[in-house]
Amino acid sequence: MISSASLTIRSEVEQRSPSAGTRAYFQARTRNKLYDFVLRRFLAEKRNGLTKAVLARRIGRKPEAITRLLGAPGNWTIDTVCDLLLGISGEELLPDARSPLDGPIRNITAVDQATMARVRNHTDAPKTSSTIPIFSSVPVSVFYAHP
């Protein structure tokens, strides 16, 4: 079942007029994808002996800066991504883009569906719901229980 929120995001993308919320959602997705890409490269080179200290020396940064950068997705600059990739694997990022409309429409995973079924069948079911973005192609509705 496709939620009304997913139809809204889909129509916003199709019409090339994304709302601030939709833009924030895709910005977060892009940051996470880029972070995952760079981190996978680092972990592959780590198996070959690369350390954060070595990477820091290679790109002229302090080791604690590398720890921070590789610790969680951040609002990296293009220059930071370039430095990290060159220092990690001697690679250059070659951008590619595709429409989120080309992929399958996903809403809730099987685990989430089982959880939601338990929530719906519970005697003190949640009183409200809210739609939040989960890093798939559309947001999912999550129920919040009030204490």
Image (tube, rainbow, N blue to C red):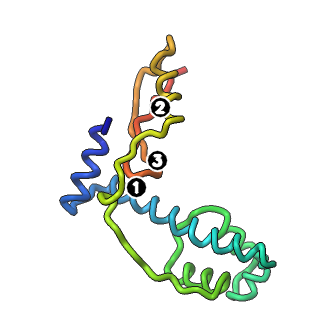
Looking at the image, is mark 1 or mark 2 nearer the viewer? 2
Q: Position of residue 37 (x, y in %)?
A: 56, 70
* Residue at 51%, 28% in the rendered image: 114
Left or right? Give the position of 143 relative to 66. Answer: left
Q: CA distance from mark 1 to mark 2?
A: 22 Å
Give SS at disc 1.
helix
| Location of mark 3 (residue) | 134
Q: Amino acid at mark 2?
A: Gln
Mark 1 residue crowding within 10 angstroms, few (<14) / some (14–19) / many (20+) = some
Q: Amino acid at mark 1?
A: Tyr
> For residue 72, what is the image quadrant?
bottom right
Give SS at disc 3.
loop
Mark 2 or mark 3: name the one nearer the start of the chain: 2
Mark 2 residue crowding within 10 angstroms, few (<14) / some (14–19) / many (20+) = few
* Residue at 47%, 23% in the rendered image: 117
Image quadrant occupied by the C terminus: top right
| Location of mark 1 (residue) | 25
For the residue pair 127 and 140, the one nearer the viewer reads as 140
Mark 1 or mark 2: name the one nearer the start of the chain: 1
* Residue at 39%, 59% in the rendered image: 26
Image quadrant occupied by the N terminus: top left
Contact flag, marks 2 and 3 (Cβ < 8 Å): no
Give SS at disc 2.
helix
